[in-house]
Image (cartoon, rainbow, N blue to C red):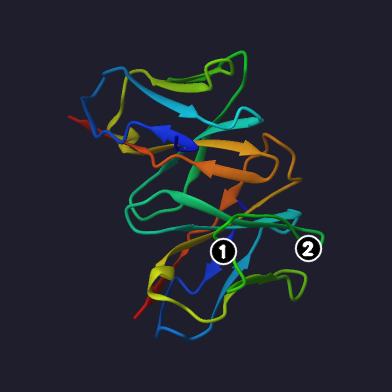
Amino acid sequence: RKEVEQDPGPFNVPEGATVAFNCTYSNSASQSFFWYRQDCRKEPKLLMSVYSSGNEDGRFTAQLNRASQYISLLIRDSKLSDSATYLCVVSNNNDMRFGAGTRLTVKP
Amino acid sequence: EPEVTQTPSHQVTQMGQEVILRCVPISNHLYFYWYRQILGQKVEFLVSFYNNEISEKSEIFDDQFSVERPDGSNFTLKIRSTKLEDSAMYFCASDTSGRRGDEQFFGPGTRLTVL
């Protein structure tokens, strides 16, 4: 089983759509969880941390289920600028493990 | 806004040559990291560094690799004898404390091409 597993997509959605990404991780000792976004040939940038209670930042909602070792990201009212690859990241101490990413394209 | 910088942006080298990739982390950050991303693949953790020593390293970070903080600002990754499969984007990152949940800030990367 891969350490961090994501559906690679691509997800092609119209503007305004709601889209959800899922991620599973194998290391039950993982302590911190993040969603990063990466634009083509650019560095990863933090989108949001993921907390056990779930958290929301504007149009973005992240959920964590430790029992199932599952993380999700929901994007509401998609914008053209949301087009990117979304990376699920799981950390144990300083050792960050990245998923391969889910590619999202938002179309007019 | 402070940012992590990396030089060069693109490095081309011959197989077997040594390369040094340079990073300047954000000035008040204490933990430093190197990652690599082979084209089309996932970002892979290489090493974390704190207080002038390695704190964690992955299975990728073998004896060919070394890191150093030679002065108060630079953080370097050396690959002693490059192989074709070392061709990748190398990202440096830093954060304020290394505490779980802190955001790591990534530099723009150095694209290494080994011929």
Q: Quadrant of residue A76?
A: top left
Query: Are circles 1 and 2 on residues that touch, CB within 8 Å?
Result: no
Q: In the rendering, at what x and y percent does residue A103 appear?
A: 30, 37
Residue shown at 52% from the left, 37% from the top: A89
| SS label for mark 1 | strand
* Residue B68 picture location, percent across and down: 70, 72
The quarter in which the C terminus of chain B is drawn is bottom left
The residue located at (38%, 32%) in the rendering is: A6
- Gap between marks 1 and 2, in whole Å? 21 Å
Element at label 2: strand
Q: Residue at x 63, y 46 (%)?
A: A95
Residue B25's disc number? none
- Residue beneath label 2, please? B53
- Viewer-nearest residue: B58 or A102: B58
Q: Please report, as a chain letter, where disc 1 is located.
A: B
Q: Is residue A19 left or right of residue A66?
A: left
Q: In the picture provided, is B21 more to the left or to the right than B24?
A: left
Question: In the figure, residue B113 lies in which quadrant?
Answer: bottom left
Q: Position of residue B38 (x, y in %)?
A: 39, 59
Residue type pointed to by label 1: Thr
Residue ID for mark 1? B5
Q: How many marks?
A: 2
Mark 1 or 2: in front is 2
In front here: B47 or B22? Answer: B47
